[in-house]
Amino acid sequence: MAEGRRASLHRRLFGWLLLPLILVLPLLGVALYGQVQRSAQNWLDEGLEDTALTLAGQIDLRGGEPRVDISATMDRALRFDRQDDVFYLVQGPRGDVLQGDAGLAELQPRPRLQPAGSVYYGDVRLRDRELRLVQLGRECGKGACQVLVAETLNKRDALQREIATYVVLNGVTLVVLLALAGWWAIRQGLAPLTGLSSELERRDLHRLTPLAASLPRELVPLQAAFNRLFERLGRAAEAQREFLADAAHQLRTPLTSLQTEIELALLEPHDARVDPMLQRLRQRVVRSARLAQQLLSLARAEDRSVDVGQPLDLRDVATESGQDWAHRSLPSGMDLGFELAEAPALGHSFLLREALENLIHNAVSYAGNGARITVRCGSGSTGAWLEVEDNGPGIPLAERPAALQRFRRGGKASGTGSGLGLAIAADIAARHGGILQLLDAHTPPGLRVRLSLPPLPDSRP
């Protein structure tokens, strides 16, 4: 699956959290709406029943016949409602109208007669008007009087709409709040995993120390697995470094002896026809010895037991290299100069001298005859630095990242180098927590290679 299409764990967890909310909350909303609507309906029905009980309390028996006396004031009070029209009817045991709206006798569906003490609630229709009806039976001597109270549905419909609106708004608000809380909780829950990923991203063969972050219990086995992997990688890398160092060390002695023998052979009287062959042989032996020295430098750069936190001055490192190069012969017309300033830093003098040696040797090998090479050092707010600049052909910008890799040379590179010089210097820079940069010369064409080290720790209290 393409990286851009791969769902993140964060989104996957959020989706699984949101899915039940989307499915369950509407059902809960419908159930809540129904419960609240029934409660409101019951409350309104109780109001109608109270009116019906009031009317039932006005029934008197006179001579065995039921009578109802309701004043005009009481009639207005019974019918008073700001939103609905209220109707009532009191009927005798034989269905005769004792008081109220006789039109209620035409209700559809026609309500059944209720025995004394019973109550009926229902929805009815009166001349195309929907009404809510309460009917109760009242003992009236020889039978049960019927008390009917009905009202239109205006406030009930308004109340239902209001309940539905509140349920929907509260449900949407709850979904949004739960979604935000879930998103935040997932981010917080996955924060240790993100931190672990960032820490792993910074690891390489030069940094295989065990992970020591405080993680949730579920991530502890993963951390332990990585630590075991780091331990195995460390042992493998150490075995590789030891093999590389041993092989390079074993090669140096015979190659040095062979180079000495060839140089002695060149000094002894010999047939002039074999002189070119001896010179080629000497060059190849020199190159092989240089390669063995570079392999040994690589092994030293990767040795984790070396303390790279020793205080030193890069000016002293460059001075020692300058004194060494003062005794070497340079190609015809080549000039090697030094512009040194105070540059305090923390590091390992021998490794930094190896890095500078490789940078100078790289410039001498590839800058060409008549080139000017300048070694500089200094310091600033970002730390101390070493720099080697030449006015040779340089390295094209597109080829510079590859030039820092081992056994890689620029497409236009000449000479007999092996492609390890810049890689060794980059490894040593990384070993010190610094960086090696390939920059344009101050005055093109040319190449400027800068090794930058971290600034000194603040010693102020």
Image (spheres, grey):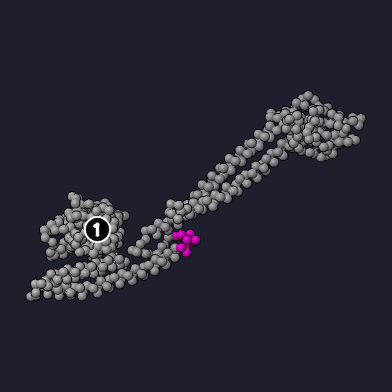
Write down the quadrant of residue 393 in the picture. Answer: bottom left
118 w.r.t. 105: above or below:
below
Q: Position of residue 195 (x, y in %)?
A: 42, 56
Q: What residue type is disc 1 on?
A: Gly
Q: Residue at x 22, y 57 (%)?
A: 412
Q: Is residue 135 left or right of residue 153?
A: right
Does the magenta run of residues contain 322?
no
Magenta residues? 214-222
Q: Residue at x 14, y 56 (%)?
A: 371
Q: Position of residue 14 (x, y in %)?
A: 51, 51
Q: Is residue 381 left or right of residue 114?
A: left
Q: Quadrant of the N terminus?
A: bottom left
Between residue 186 and residue 373, name the one nearer to us.
373
As drawn, the residue found furthest toward the front would be: 273
421 w.r.t. 17: above or below:
below
Write down the quadrant of residue 424 in the picture. Answer: bottom left
As drawn, the residue found furthest toward the top would be: 72
Q: Is residue 349 visible?
A: no
Q: Residue at x 26, y 52 (%)?
A: 397
Helix, strand or loop at mark 1: loop
Q: How many marks?
A: 1
Q: Quadrant of the C terminus?
A: bottom left
Q: Position of residue 107 (x, y in %)?
A: 78, 32
Q: According to the image, label 1 marks what residue? A: 410
